Image: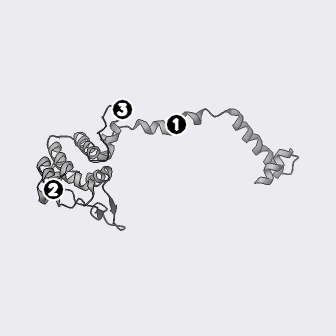
């Protein structure tokens, strides 16, 4: 794609195209009070090559290095920033702004399409929601905390472990123990 065609399609000026992505654009900062915090998350989710050069006690958001010459950086400057500005103008709440940030990060990332949002997957907006009380409950986490296979363990494994432990204790105390307990005690 010719750069001049990209400028015409995106509505950005060539001076905006040379902006350093390590700093959140002023247009975005004016539209979202949390833009400075969300900008780094946005860049990470889009896949722009970057690294934090911060030292202890310094702010990672202001001391990061971004590859401004990468294809992802070009996509963000050409299409992402203008679309982000246009969509943020129509928002009034933090949830609406989170939807815009998420949508633009998905649109600027590698891939062919933007996934749909439904009531089941609204937790994907959480990284772009700053206020803790507004974050959505992540049902994926609940599925991970209590796996079915863990609660369905057979009772024989528990009783075998208990009996082996009992034999080992008997062997250590000098009581007569079975040969299996002696083998298990030698292994410890």
Q: Which residue is rendered at x = 27% and y = 51% of the image? A: 38
**Element on which disc 2 rests:** helix
Eye-nearest disc, 2 or 1? 2
What's the CA distance linking mark 3 and mark 1? 19 Å
Q: Are marks 3 and 1 in contact (CB under 8 Å)?
A: no
**Can residue 10 be seen here?**
yes
Q: Please state the horizontal and vertical placement of residue 8, each as a whole percent of the image.
A: 11, 49
Mark 1 packing: few (<14 Cα in 10 Å), some, or many (20+)?
Answer: few
Q: List x then y, in percent, for residue 132.
A: 32, 45
Disc 1 target residue: 146
Find residue 15 and report its image quarter.
bottom left
Q: Please tell me whether residue 176 is drawn above or below residue 116 in the rendered image.
A: below
* Residues tagged 2 and 3 counted as in contact (Cβ below 8 A): no
Reading the image, the residue beneath label 2 is 26
Element type at mark 1: loop
Residue drawn at (34%, 41%) of the image: 124
Q: Quickly name the residue at label 3.
A: 120
**Residue under the image location 82 percent in, 46 percent down:** 181
Q: Nearer the viewer, residue 111 or 40?
A: 111
């Amino acid at each position: 794609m010719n750069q001049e065609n990209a400028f015409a399609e995106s509505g950005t000026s060539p001076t905006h195209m040379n902006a350093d992505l390590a700093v959140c654009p002023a247009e975005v900062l004016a539209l979202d009070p949390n833009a400075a915090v969300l900008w780094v998350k946005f860049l990470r989710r889009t896949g722009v090559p970057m690294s934090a050069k911060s030292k202890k006690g310094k702010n990672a958001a202001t001391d990061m290095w971004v590859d401004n010459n990468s294809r992802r950086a070009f996509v963000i400057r050409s299409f992402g920033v203008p679309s982000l500005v246009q969509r943020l103008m129509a928002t009034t709440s933090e949830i609406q702004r989170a939807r815009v940030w998420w949508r633009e990060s998905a649109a600027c990332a590698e891939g062919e399409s933007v996934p749909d949002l439904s009531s089941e997957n609204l937790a994907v907006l959480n990284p772009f929601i700053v206020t803790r009380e507004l974050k959505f409950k992540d049902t994926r986490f609940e599925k991970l905390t209590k796996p079915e296979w863990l609660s369905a363990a057979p009772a024989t494994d528990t009783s075998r472990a208990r009996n082996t432990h009992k034999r080992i204790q008997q062997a250590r105390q000098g009581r007569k123990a079975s040969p299996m307990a002696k083998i298990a005690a030698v292994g410890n």
